[in-house]
Amino acid sequence: MAKLVFGMNQSLDGYVDHTGFAPGPVLFRHFIEQAQGQTGSVYGRVMYEIMRYWDDEHPEWNAEERAFAAAWRRQPKWVVSRTLKSVGPNATLVGDDLEGAIRALKAGHDGEIEVAGPNLAKRLTELGLIDEYRIYLHPVVLGQGQPYFAGPRPPLRLVSHEPMGEDVLRLTYVPA
């Protein structure tokens, strides 16, 4: 059975914003390795549209960016959206039965399935489907934006903490 993991970069004041800060080289290498080992990813529409950036080749990319793009393209993606009618390569739209679809994904796969996007994570948290939360805590204060926890904070238990380079700390929690 697959484990559903929600992990994102977060500011000290609790926000996620891909335009507010970015991972440094050490953390980016970690994300490449993570993407290479994941069973797949479940995206909400907004996060999927942001990540579609990696579907196209960009001549200015360095070797690390090309490695991440290759890993992202290779893994299966499941996209939860009521508005999208189609999705890109190696992606599948999830129908109206979110809970049933995610339970089937977990039961039908092994390894880790990433949850991408705080709004989707909120819905999956409410359904009790997320097995692990990974907060990549950056020494940045944004003062606004999308919160990591888009809804009520679930009761959690810290299971590990690890420095990730560039003053980032990875905090790993499981539901309490």
Image (cartoon, helix red, strand yellow):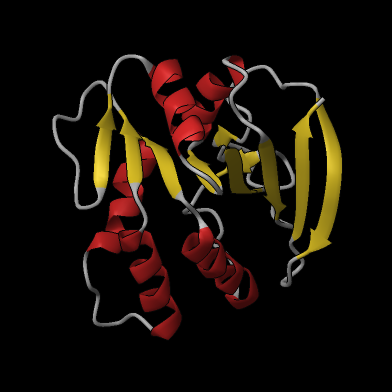
Q: Quadrant of residue 165?
A: bottom right
Q: Quadrant of the C terminus?
A: top right
Q: Is residue 136 left or right of residue 4?
A: right
Q: Nearer the viewer, residue 130 or 29?
A: 130
Place of residue 140 in the rendered image (x, y in percent of width and height, measured from the top left): 69, 55
Q: Is residue 82 left or right of residue 48?
A: left
Residue drawn at x 62%, y 40% as measured from the top left: 15
Q: Nearer the viewer, residue 130 or 148?
A: 130
Which residue reaches farthest bottom?
Answer: 63
Residue drawn at x 34%, y 70% as measured from the top left: 70
- Above/below status of 64 relative to 141: below
Q: Nearer the viewer, residue 139 or 159?
A: 159
Place of residue 50 in the rendered image (x, y in percent of width and height, measured from the top left): 34, 48
Q: Quadrant of the N terminus?
A: top right
Place of residue 18 in the rendered image (x, y in percent of width and height, measured from the top left): 48, 52
Q: Quadrant of residue 66?
A: bottom left
Residue drawn at x 77%, y 67% as measured from the top left: 167
